[in-house]
Image: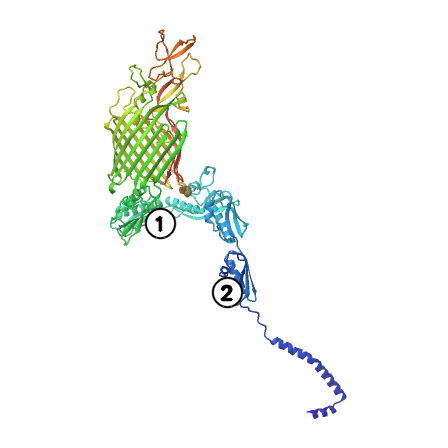
Amino acid sequence: MTDFASAAARRTTPHARLAIALLAGTMLAGVPQIAAAQEESEEAAAPAPVPQQDTVRTIAVIGAQRLEPQTILSYIRLRVGDTWTQALGDQVLKDLYATELFSTASVVNNSGDVVITIVENPVINRIILEGNKRLKNDKILPEIRLSPRQIFTRSKVRADVARIIELYKRQGRFAATVEPKMVELSQNRVDIVYEINEGPKSKVRQINIIGNEKFSDGDLRGEMLTKQARFTSFFSSNTSYDPDRLAFDQQKLRQFYLTEGYADFRVVSAVAELTPDKRDFIITYVIEEGERYKFGDVKVESQIRDFDSEAMTGRLAMTGGDWYDAKAVEDTVEQLTELAGTFGYAFADISPEFNRNPETLTMDVTYVLREAPRVYVERIDVNGNTLTQDKVVRREFRAAEGDAFNSLAIRRSTARINSLGFFQENFEINQVEGSQPDRIVLEANVEEQATGELQLSAGFSSLESFILAGSIRQRNFRGRGQTIGLSLNYSRYSRSAQISFTEPYVFDRNISLGFDVYRRDYNSFNFRNSQRNTTFEQATTGFSLRAGVPVTEYVSAIGSYTFNYDDVTLGREYFSDRDGDGVFTCDPIIAGRYLCEAIGNRVSSIIGLTLAYDTLDSRLRPSRGETASITTEFAGLGGSVKYLRARTRAAKYWSVGSGFIFSVTGEGGYIHGLGGSDTPGTDSVRLTDRFQLGEPQIRGFDIRGIGPRVVRLQYVDDDNDATTPDVPQSIEEALSGRRRIDDALGGRAYYLGRAELELPLGSGARELGLRPSIFFDVGSLFKVTRPILQDFPLGIQEQDANGNLIYLQRSVDDRGNDVILRVANPTAPDGSANSPSYISGTNFKEVFVGDSPSPRVSIGIGVNWNSPFGPFRIDFSKVLKSQTGDDTKRFSFNVGTQF
């Protein structure tokens, strides 16, 4: 190799050596670049470095105040030993914010040491509502989610704002706004303030109906519950917009058209648009009336062997050719169901099948009574009674365990239990399937209510001074259905006390027994010269016994016995010795013959019998049914009082739909005295035994405000001339005075009638127990012997303590002065006549008024309210017709309480 090279070098020319040298230099210059390129190629081929992956060694929590760090760590998924990734860090934040316990949160990883920094949401100290007047706090606070001592979260605040606005929308206030505010306090606490702007109540400005041709807009609006806001509907609560009411009105429209025969009727659309100012709504209904149908073939198909299809078809209320009426179809189904129930088919399936004939515009209806087994009462359960004994409820059932089911008996049982007044209103007996298809269980699920009644009243008047009255009664004593009561009344001029007890089932038999023991003291009065004077005092002590037995399911007989001892007295100023025989007797000139005839001691021994008929669904608050009674009383089975008295009363109640209850009541009575009196001006029935009429029997009149009476007209000196006679004031002037001077005499006959319509209110008013009604009362009290009247133009002559008349005698005293002596001798020592001494202010004239059968008429409105402090009744009355002497009264009320 070396020799080959030396020989080649020797053979190379100079030019060749130059070319080789240049080539060699070029090659040597490129060697560093090639080396560098090789290094870059090697670096590019090397793998990328692996990013840092720390293992979580510790997890620390910074910023916790109320919550323990371990509690906060339990909310996240990251644990010690996990490999840290950014995705895990993001998940930690998501977990923390999902708890809604923190306002801010952050996570930092320091080479495996994870630090979580949080700021806790504050604790709510108070929830404050501002600006709410229509909805009180107790209506709003239970509906919102936030409450004191909870953790504040913005999502709950937003939900509460939406909820409050929704509450106002239900009240018809769609313009209501709520702005929440937070007041920061110490120790990371806040007060949440909801500033409420209730806005006006959104009314229904207009109701538009499109598509009606057969009936006018006014007719259809009259069927709706929602009413247009007008001045005349100022007191109506149905002028506000309510979505539920809108749906109900659509059903009302459909029901109206179906009852009129328009079977194809439908509501295409119902849209409620809120005006831009959010104050009113405009409701638009689009309807299709369709054609009017008539009944076609109407029949009954009974699969129950006890019912004949043809006979039942002949008893249907509708026939072919009558206009179709969906309400009549519903009523017929109800009647057939009730009929099946009376025969023991409690689960009878009765359904109408319709066949519409558009060509003939007729509707065929077939009432199908499907096969069903007869049902028997397996068991009667009484639930919910804690005080009332089971037997008190069970003895009112008209069906017993093992009896065949009868819907009439169940309805009667419901009415009897309702009439007890021990349980909730509208109580119903539930019917539950028994252990077998032909067995039924009757459940009386009762809710006991207060049966004790406490009534207290107190007052003060210039006539009676202090007045106090109270009564206590328990209608379910010891849970046995017994009634016990005590009443006390006290004032300056009247006092009374009474104890009563009634056992409706003596020895668990259907026989009632009761008694009353009482004492009543009453002082009647009039005025003399603006001074009140007692005219007579009546003290009655007595007792009464009563016993009742059922004659039929709806008729009862009640016998009674009453014993009274009456002591009627007058003040000594009404007695005189006009005959001069030393015997002082009642002076009819001073007291009036009608008072003189009443004084004395009398014993009344009275037996009575009452026949009562009652089909009311409730004796306390009836809504349907009727009641009637006739009572006769005979006084004379011993004692000194003899008369025959008869009274009758009847009432009927109708539920006229939509919550209206209409009732009509009538009563009357007559008393006939046995033995009579031959004294002119004396009635055969004494004053204290006659009928009296006024409040509360007929509203619009005061107590004893109707009937015969004696009115005293004062003589008035109209010309200030002592030489001319005075003239009596008119009856109108006497009766319009602040202290009218009259005496109610009562009457031997009376009649009374009343028509009343109870008005339904909204659910809110019903919850408050408000039951308003309008009424029409008519009645009269009359027939009494005309008394002998008195006329004293100069007045009543004075008497001394011994009853001697007083005269005025002229005389001269020791100094020679003229004096007037008051003596008991009508003649002076010189033989001249002494002048009578008259009592000042006793110059009066009596007139007899009011003894007329002409009706007294009044109308008015009243409200029954089950108030928090007891039952309350208030009446406003307007008298349309009265007679001279009647004492009218526009306003009356009564209040009590229950326990």
Estimate the x, y position of residue 279 in percent, counting from the top left: 51, 43
Residue 583 in the image, given as x and y percentages of width and height: 29, 17
Report crowding for label 2: few under 14, some 14 to 19, many 20 or more residues within 10 A (C-alpha): some
**Picture coordinates of residue 213, whole percent (x, y):** 43, 43
Q: Quadrant of residue 524?
A: top left
Per the rendering, the mark at residue 357 is 1
Q: Nearer the viewer, mark 2 or mark 1?
A: 2
Examine the image and state in which quarter residue 563 appears.
Answer: top left
Which residue is at the far top?
Answer: 830
Q: How is the image coloured?
A: rainbow
Q: Residue shown at 72%/82% (left/top)?
A: 25
Determine whether the residue tagged by mark 2 lies in a helix, strand or loop. loop
Q: Nearer the viewer, residue 870 or 221?
A: 870
Vertical comparison of 681 with 216: above or below: above
Q: Nearer the viewer, residue 883 or 94?
A: 94
Q: Amino acid at mark 1?
A: Asn
Nearest the camera: 89 or 882? Answer: 89
- Outermost residue on the right side: it is 14
Q: Is residue 891 visible?
A: no
- Of marks 2 and 1, which one's residue comes earlier in the chain? 2
Residue position for label 2: 79
